[in-house]
Image: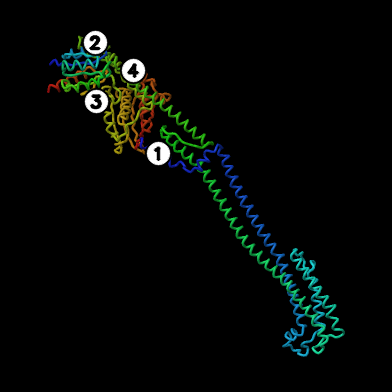
Amino acid sequence: MTGERILVVEDNEKNMKLFRDVLVATGYRTLEATTGGEAVDMASEHTPDLVLMDIQLPDLDGVEALRRLRADERTATIPVLALTAQAMRGDRERFLAEGFDGYVSKPVNVRELIGIVRQHCEGRLG
Amino acid sequence: MAEERDSRVAREGRRRIGDPFVRGVARLPANVRTKLLIAFVGTALLLVAVGLLGQRVLGQSNDRVASVGPLQERAVQYSRLQAEAEHLRGVLSANVAKEFSIGWKDSALPQIRGTYSLAVDLFAVDAADRIGARTAPDRLLFTPPLKDQKILDGIKNTAEKLSTLLLEEVIPVYGDRTTISNEDRDLREEMLPLRADAEQLATDLHQRAADLADGTRAEVEELIARNASSFASSRALFIGVAAGAIVLALLLGFVLSWSVIGPIQNIDTRLAAIASGDFSGRVEVQNRDELGALGANVNRMNDELRRLYNELEEASQHKSEFLANMSHELRTPLNAIIGFSQVLRDEMVGSVNEKQAEYLDDIISSGNHLLSLINDVLDLSKVEAGQVELEVHPFSLREALERGVVMVRERATEDGVRVAFVADPEVDVVAGDERRIKQVIFNLLSNAVKFTPAGGEVDVSATRANGEVRVSVADTGPGIAPEDRERIFEEFQQSETGVGLREGTGLGLALSKRYVELHGGRIWVESELGRGSTFTFALPARSSTS
């Protein structure tokens, strides 16, 4: 357990609790944002190791938030995973094309989520 | 697109007839039937006019020919009159010593040279009487015109005078002689002035007859010449009018037909565009007849179709958005349900007992079932809304089948079911939507494994025949009752046995059927209760439905 900091961007309270508890139980530290704007601010302030980004958010949507992260050199290299209930056909390809480093659809398989998070954190360190 | 439209407009424009006559006829506020009637009646009237003119020309020509006949008859009669007058003059001249001697100079009768003969003079009287008689209308066999009549009267008078002169003055000179010879000088002296008078009268007579005959002949010639020239001009007039009528009739036909065909072509072009889904244009028909009404209706139809099309598109857009939202909104709580259950089940927050673990597994599998139901409903809604566009590419059907078999084999082995796969060597690459065909294959395979009891087997085979590729999945399950064999392809309709099993969304076969049919193929089942079922789908070997 290296205790990487993961920024979870999620507007649904219960899902936020799920992701927080899973990540903390797995040994990560979490930062939490419930809107896109908040996510961008927190990312530039704390420069987390990974961002799990919901797409449908109250103010900026996840895609726009990603653009802002990429535009700011402090946050440009942070890996960002789309973590979304937008899981219609073609959505995965669409989000990867937008520049997300990965895509996890809701409902998530907790073990899979942990696997992907771990993979990206290790990839970043290595 | 815009460019294409421009070129089409140009094409339509070219078809529009620029002829002002055609436009004029098109704009006439009368229906096509009336226009046609007018055109036909117009053409018929032209024909009648040409016919009447022809008849008149022919009649005039006939009249002229007829008028030549009597004139010629007159000329002949007058010529005879002239001939007789000339003869009379000759006879009288011959009886005058001087001329007589000349006239008879070479005669075989020299002894009668210079002799007046009573017989000759009597003959002259006869001739003069005959000429006089000949001027009478009943002898002429026609009624001479006034100017001829005057001359004829003159001839008759002169002939009578001559006759009288001869009878009453010349012939008494003979006394009882039959001739007066050169020696009878006294008598000759007496005769000479009389003869000069007679000769003068005869010459006069001849002159009149000659005038009459010559005049009439000239008249005949003039009439013939006049006939010839008026025939020529009549013919020219007739030909001209006939040609004009033909040109006019052709023009009438041309103008009328283009005033009809032009709009029809315009309307046809527009309809073809509408049929191919282009509602952007309007047809321009200037006619104020049925075609104008047709054009207006086509435009109204176009507008109405465009409105409906836009509405449909909007509705379809709304539906798509609704489906996307629904999917999102259902998945969000499902994320918490499944996620927390997994957290508990994996004992990340403390241990659970056996019963609790079982219930958590039930929550998780029900959650996953709900998820696949959401996916299937969305897929089906898209198919129903016609929003599914197949992504047709050539792909290896054999590989797809092999992968499907691999995917179900694990579960099959767990359940004690053997899965076998046989494919014809010709079955390989087909054109189709790979992902959806795989979905169909997986659906059939997982159904077969699900319904086959332990120890049973699932046989997958692929063949190619009659221009189609067939994939069959045969199981040794419970089979499907005949009354269920159609129903199972409908939404949420499962067989009795299927209802017994708690798995399945009841949408898999309905979706499979839709996908196969979108490819232009078909799917069906053969089954025997207690023995098993064989599901088969067939795709056109060249399945390019896009």
Q: CA distance from mark 4 to mark 2?
A: 22 Å
The residue carrying mark 2 is B354
Q: Is residue B385 above or below residue B20?
A: above
Crowding at mark 2 (Cα within 10 Å: few <14, some 14-19, many 20+): few
Mark seen at residue B497: none
**Could you say which quadrant of the image residue B406 lies in?**
top left
Mark seen at residue B8: 1
Q: Residue at x 24, y 10 (%)?
A: B354
Do circles 4 and 1 both sit on a common chain? Answer: yes
Please state which amino acid type lies under the numbered disc 4: Arg
Q: Chain of mark 3?
A: A
The residue carrying mark 3 is A98
Do circles 4 and 3 both sit on a common chain? Answer: no
Does dot 1 land on a helix, a strand or a loop?
helix
Q: Residue furthest right?
A: B176
Q: CA distance from mark 2 to mark 3?
A: 45 Å
Q: CA distance from mark 4 to mark 3?
A: 40 Å
Do circles 2 and 1 both sit on a common chain? Answer: yes
Which sits in the foreground, B192 or A34?
B192
Mark seen at residue B502: 4
Q: Chain of mark 1?
A: B
**Could you say which quadrant of the image residue B182 lies in?**
bottom right
Does dot 2 land on a helix, a strand or a loop?
helix
